[in-house]
Amino acid sequence: MLRSCICIKKERRDSQNSSTSSCRSSEIERNAAAISNLDDDRDNRSFMKFLSSTLCFRIVRTPRRGMSMTKVERVIKATLLIQRWYRRYMARIEMKRRYTWTIFQNIEYSAEQDQVRLYNFFNDLLMHMPEAAKQVKDLDEVSTSSAEESLDDDFVDETDDSDDAMDDQKTYRGPHLNLPLEKQDLDMLINLFRKRKYSLHAKYVALILREAAKKLRRLDNINRASTEIKGSKTVTVVGDLHGKLDDLLVILYKNGLPSHTNCYVFNGDFVDRGKKSLEVLLILLSCFIIFPGCVMLNRGNHEDSVMNHRYGFTREVHQKYRHNADRLLKLIDQVYRHLPLGTLINNKIFVVHGGISENTDLNLIASVRRSKYISILRPPTQPNDDASDFKTEWKQVIDILWSDPIMNDPICPTPNKRGAGECFGPETTNKFLQRHNLTTLVRSHECKSDGYEIVHNGNVITVFSASNYYEIGSNKGAYIKFGANSDRYFVQFTAAASKTKKLTFRQQVDNVEKSAIRELKEKLREQKLNLQKQFKMRDVENTGHLSLSQWSEAMESVTNYKLPWRLLREKLAVMNENNEILYENTLQLIEIDDDIKIGANDSNKITDTMYTNRENLEAIFRMMDLDSNGLISIDEFKQACEMLSAYLPNYDVDQMLENCRMMDINKDSLVDLNEFLEAFRLSQQSANHTSVIRNSKLIETTVKVDENSIENAKNNSADNAHDENIKGGDAQVDEYEISEMKEVTSGGRMRKSPSIRSVVSVESLGQTVGNNNETKNDKLQNDDGVAIEDIISKVDDK
Amino acid sequence: MEEYFDIPVNLNDDLDRKIADAFSIFDHHGQKTVDVREVGSILRFLGLVPTEQEVSETIAETEFAGDSSGTVHLSKFLPYVKNLIIERRMEPVAIEKLLEAFQVLDYEGKGFVTRDFMAKIMMEEGEPFSLEELEEMFSCAVDSSNVRIPYEYYLNQLIIDI
């Protein structure tokens, strides 16, 4: 939002009162300033009003000095006033947009942090209990070997692969797939996924997964791509997609299908959050199979079953393939563990999902046996390895998938706010690039409102390809095309452009803000008891109110979110005449919500948490149950809880213990697995208790902890379109807005071309993707003018 | 590359904290610095209505000296801006003044100004709008005829948020 005024550029330090500036605008400014002082005088004001209503400026002149203004001057003054005011108005909206962003980001990272902490707890427990560790290792080996076998087996038992009512293979009306996969199969898949008339038979899903895993297994840890040799002309890097199928399709449409002159690097995080993660994954894997050598896949931190449990992909697979989900998920794990970790372009540009840390060593990474990391968060248990070596290697892998860049170098290694990986500054980047003789680091992992961001003096580029990630209108997506001679071509796009086009910027921002506040309130509801405690603590004299500072402090200590609480105050609290906040009001306000669907969300969330944590909790239980009789003592349980509380400070451990004692119905001080799980569920639910009894759309949460009810919960959530962990932006998409900007190095200098904007309608996607061919890509590269028109005219034709 | 050590900033009262909060929204990396180009937005959000020139002055007074990276640190920003607020400079105008301003532009007293006229004057006079600012304003100011801006109606709509 840079504006240019000539006098500002030339003579910045001139104040309004200086007479040396010869700019017309500043001259007017001085006059206007002088006059506006007089305007405050009431007589003058009414006189001015009289003047303006008579329209006879020239005639009416008063003898008072400074009062005579030509018509032109009045117009200029009015213009300045309007501009000044308007800019303030827009700045308020921009501010709103910013803090909304901060809210979303805080919630996202803090959730990741919880997840990681839980896993750190789990890992530490393993370290301290070698017998338990051995149990887990055995389990791992069993699942690994059976999965490896199934890679080579054919699917023998076909009746198992039926889906829903289609027991008989003959009633399946969807398409069929056979190896070897070819381009027409890709076209078919794209059409199928867009139109959603049938779903792909589970055995074909398995076919794609298996074939991909087989091929991935043969690759090195670090892919190599080139814009110079072997006739390859461009390499396009695509960032996080997170299940946004339409974004992927628009990229393939706009940029063409992969080919030897049009290579792709997909930089991780294909799944989770978006509703079409499975489709995105299948299309990417199909491209990988069909266009060998032209598609490179990097593993992201979400290519990990632990993350998928929490962020929606596991649930999506269960919803779409009720009977085959477990088998398919096992195959997906096989794909994940064989995904390469990074890509080198021209030996100069390193593309990796997260980033780097001080210790990142590409040689070490290249030599790791990556297939042993089924989940990145859980290191493989190998008692034979030297503990420190093993930890070093594990850290190398985690760091490149989880780290984030920061503006300045910290004095000592800074842990990432997400809970895994590190924060790396420009010095770290420099050293890394020098050490390996590279020019640039390209990474993804962080949502950027423009779709991409360049930091660290141009050495680090973040590219993020899921538009409308937090909410419709929250951000653009982008991809980067690298050509010969370090040419870089940035393309940004926005889905649902038609939806947002009809709204003004202010309305868009308001919508996104509403969504953010809603999520924030949800998080606050979870912590209601804690919040109450924090308020009361500060209200020493029990007056019922707190100062703005105290209130803000309380909010921050409960959530650990670094938000501008003072600015959010009006949405979350009421202030009285003495500028005091009645905090009881906050506790009430967070219960109220415009969105009626919240009731449904609650039941989902409880079962989600249960489902997410159930595996963790069960594993923890089994580890504590050393004699494997299915029972643990209350004391052991207490110990475990205390350990856990160190990792999850927001978990109310005392409440948990209390519940556990209550649960011990037979009072023999022993807890079995169900009681154990119930204790965790209840402690969560007590915090939510009041919030569930709200408006008329109450949904009873009678989730009993046993196999059947988990199954029911999965089915219920299938009926619910809205899901906490599956983010918005998947509305009826009909139009995309695309804008492109090229950075060309000519004579060693970077030149930016102006943005070209175009609009693409999704209807045209299905057919045109299939028709893309290499000549079109060449056009795009060689002669921009002609190429863009071609695309636009294609749109017009449809 | 200079290393900035953490310069301590004392927040003594609510006004300090309010300024710090607004500042923090644009502080992407948690290091108490913002890009100079954001200064205008921060001032405006705090309730000030500076001209572009006044924004430039603020930048000049608060930018890191001899620094070409274009950053402003909170330690300098806070006292300067606090002063601006206390001295009641750059204060907003009453909405009636705005109405008057539009009425000045509406020479013939028709109750509206034309889109073309507004475009010309906003982009050529005073501290000119960029094309984006203009389009954004028009997206809600222009009525269904697509040529007229009934300013009184427009202002009434916008009052709600100010």
Image: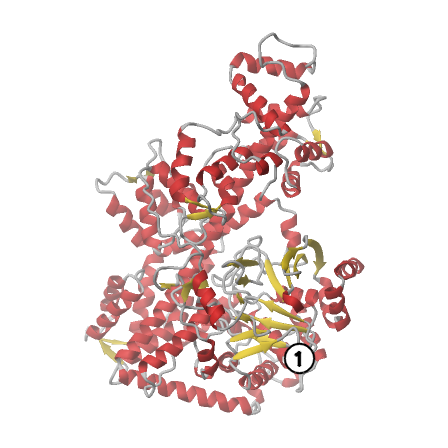
Q: Quadrant of residue A495?
A: bottom right
The image shows residue A576 at horizontal and vertical percentages of: 35, 34
The image shows residue A122 at horizontal and vertical percentages of: 33, 74
Classify residue A370 as left or right of residue A131. Answer: right
Q: Farthest residue toward the top? A: A63
Q: Quadrant of residue B149?
A: top right
In the image, is residue A511 above or below residue A675? Answer: above
Do we see residue A699 in this rendering?
A: no
Q: Residues within 10 Å of mark 1 (few under 14, many from 20)?
A: some
Do we see residue A72 in this rendering?
A: yes
- Quarter holding the N terminus of chain B? bottom left
Hey, what amino acid is under mark 1? Answer: Phe
In the image, is residue A694 above or below residue A462? Answer: above
Chain letter of the residue carrying label 1: A
Q: Which structural element holds mark 1?
A: loop
The image shows residue B63 at horizontal and vertical percentages of: 46, 42
Q: Quadrant of residue A463?
A: bottom right
- Which residue does the numbered mark 1 point to in the structure image? A291
Q: Looking at the image, which residue is at 75% across and 73% down?
A: A774
In the image, is residue A482 above or below residue A585? Answer: below
Classify residue A436 as left or right of residue A784. Answer: left
